[in-house]
Image: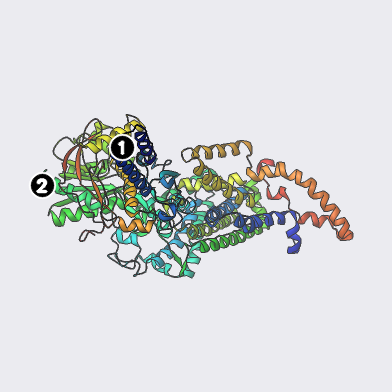
Amino acid sequence: MKTSSPMKWFVSREGLYYLGLAALLVIILPLLLDPFRLNMVGKYLTYAFVAIGLVMCWGKAGILSLGQGVFFGLGGYCMAMFLKLEASSPENTAIQSTPGIPDFMDWNQLTALPWFWEPFHSFSFTLLAVIGVPVLLAFVIGLAMFTRRVGGVYFAIITQAIAAVLTILIIGQQGFTGGVNGITDLQTLKGWDIRTDEARTTLYFICVGMLFLCLFVARFVQNSKLGRILVAMNAQETRVRFSGYDVAAFKIFVFCLAAAFAGVGGAMFTLIVGFMSPSFIGIVASIEMVIFCALGGRLSILGAVYGALLVNAAKSGFSESFPELWPFAMGALFIGVVLAFPNGMAGLYQSYVMPLEDKIFKRKKVKATAAAEPQAVKPTVEKADDYDPMIDNYSPEKS
Amino acid sequence: MGTTDTTASGRSFGKGLGFRKSLMTLAASVMLATSAQAATPSTAEVNTTGLAVTDDTVTVGILHSITGTMAISEIGSVQAEKLAIKQINESGGVLGRQIDFVQEDGASDWPTFAEKSRKLLRQDNVAAIFGAWTSASRKAVLPVMEQYNGMLYYPTFYEGLEQSPNVVYTGQEATQQILASLNWAAETKGAKSFYLLGSDYIWPRTSNKIARKHIEDKLGLKVSGEEYYPLGHTQFNSVINKIKLKKPDVIFASVVGGSNVAFYKQMKAAGIDFTDEKPLLLTISVTEDEIRGIGGENVDGIYASMKYFQSLDNANNKEFVAAFKEAYGDDMVIGDVTQAAYLGPWLWKAAVEKAGSFDIDKIREEFAGIEFKKAPEGYVRIHENHHLWSKTRIGQAQTDGQYKVVYETEELMEPDPFPEGYQ
């Protein structure tokens, strides 16, 4: 990517993919859909944050985490705690035995706000916590696992166990967490009613903005030397280690990065959906997140976004059309995709659409450049600037 | 109706009957025709808020889990609601309109409930929603109902501590279900000590809180233990040992769902016989539906405190059970919540007709005092706090999976979702 100008990047093939996604999310969908449907798309997009993290962590670096729901949930709960405190003003909760604390605490006979809820009165602390808490947990897990060289299936199982533990903890400590009900009835964000159509639409655009921010961070990482080391590590971990790199540090970094993305997604989810509950952070939810990523293509960050969109849209669509049979339709979709396109939609795109595109794209490009500025063409730089699917989609099976 | 009568009177003219008689017939048919017209007022008049009401139909929503862990419980509610809608349609509909319904699946997932309720209110503009089962799903739906001014008819017995202008609670709240049964255990069975246990979420915890206050403060008796187990827990050996050690007179159980199967089987395997006088097992969570899963032989002799049992001996209930079995098969059982779900569409119809309008705000004004005399549980009436007056009944489980009613309160109990002195 070197020193190319931003303008040039936007007309490169990779840039066009990003522009295409941006056009879809910023122009096409908002024009086509009413606020209700747009809000649902916003919800789907919050899962895309997790899927992007999984592409980095699992697709690139080969660390399969089956506990991404944990980080999604932590981000979401941090945001929900802030919103809940705002919704539990003494006037709003005058009916309770102890006014001024969240309703579920009152039901559970708590008479004072627990200490760890106190900082969530502050919005800036909440914003920090949305990323900080998931990253901190990921760091601790990563440190404990990767420095001991725990990896592969063992790591997957441990992350899954953590998802189970956190769910049980949250459900069990209902006085502090709202238990299985979750944290519900969230109303305003710093006085701004998040339940109106306008607010939901605004939140959708904020979500899209954050998503692109995460996409660019992920893209930056994958194109940097760090990204190449991650891929190398996935293919030949021992060789990377013997070359003098601290493999554990790289793994911890990418795991924390994925956790940060998931945390942001969780916080956006809470804002868009209006509540948080343990059902999004458990084992099933975490595995679903891996499916979003696998369906989109586990090596492509853009594919992950489409994967999250498609799976969730299918889920809503199927369940509305055949309320009694939709789980079977979803199952068929998963099985079909895995059997037919093991590299997900991105793989499908690469093998079928891309060659076609190549024909049209190249012919046009040659003509255009030849006509406009014949002597300015530097083929080698052009090539490096271009989106190289082999690098982006490097997979150990191919080597 | 109007048309039939006009032709009948026309025919009587043709037959040359006496002038006076034909005049009377004519007058009668005119009256009938006008009354039929009054029964189907214009849409503009009964729907000023843009609900899905046409000249012939009105659309309502059914929102339950038909997939996921709650499906086994909620399918009975769906069946009951559909049956009620079908019966209402056959008897002429609501304000002369046939009821159409849109069904959505909450998938045992609380946010899905919220999303689907928003869809029903925003996209389908339904005039009422019948649905939700767990408190978690109700809590998720509640803000949506309040935001878009929908009306939810919620059928499950629950913990109380809630009173929304956008919900009608057709099941019992905690005090209705608990207080009478504890009094009964103390008075009739001479119970002195109680062991409280339940699944670990808000409903059992709140129910036990009310039970403990009542046992200790009002009855002056002893609570010898209180314990909770996570949802889905299947190892009850330690609590069984404690029960054997402490020998309580009553085990007051609010274990829910699949845990019940393990709980009752392990109790039986440990040699605790519920057909003995002591310990007496009093549950507030095992309906006929759950017994199907647990097996009648494992719950033989336990007592349940509910407002409805399938075995209730009254004409309304016999008609209801027969209609339910005709619609869904002879092997169906009907539990407390299923009956409460059946009440929803009927109460809605009564409220709409009393208000003369489908508009939620107008209906809400009319709730207090609305009654349903044909209720399978006997008779119900809506309290101004949106809960139902109802009787509490104690049934003893038989090996065939049915309850035999051994006690019922004489009067309807007043719903009290925010009980003073019990919080």
Left-right relation of B229 to B212: right
Q: Specify the amino acid type for callout 1.
A: Asp
Between A82 and B235, the one lying in front of the other is: A82
Q: Which residue is mark 2?
A: B187
**A37 over B189 or under it: above or below:** below
What is the chain letter for disc 1?
B
Q: Which three-letter amino acid code belongs to the residue tagged 2?
A: Glu
Left or right, A359 with reference to A135: right
Residue at mark 1: B289
Q: Nearer the viewer, residue A40 or B230?
A: A40
Classify A267 as above or below B70.
below
Specify few, some or many for label 2: CA neighbours under 10 Å numbering under 14, 14-19, or 20 or more: few
**Relative to B49, is B273 above or below?**
above
Which one is earlier in the sequence, the residue at label 1 or at label 2?
A: 2
Q: Quick one: quadrant of the N terminus of chain B?
A: top left
On the question of residue A1 being in view, the answer is: no
Q: Position of residue B359 (x, y in %)?
A: 39, 56
Residue shown at 19% from the left, 42% from the top: B394
Q: Quadrant of residue B366?
A: bottom left
Pointer 2 chain: B
**Residue B263 x, y percent position in the rendering:** 28, 39
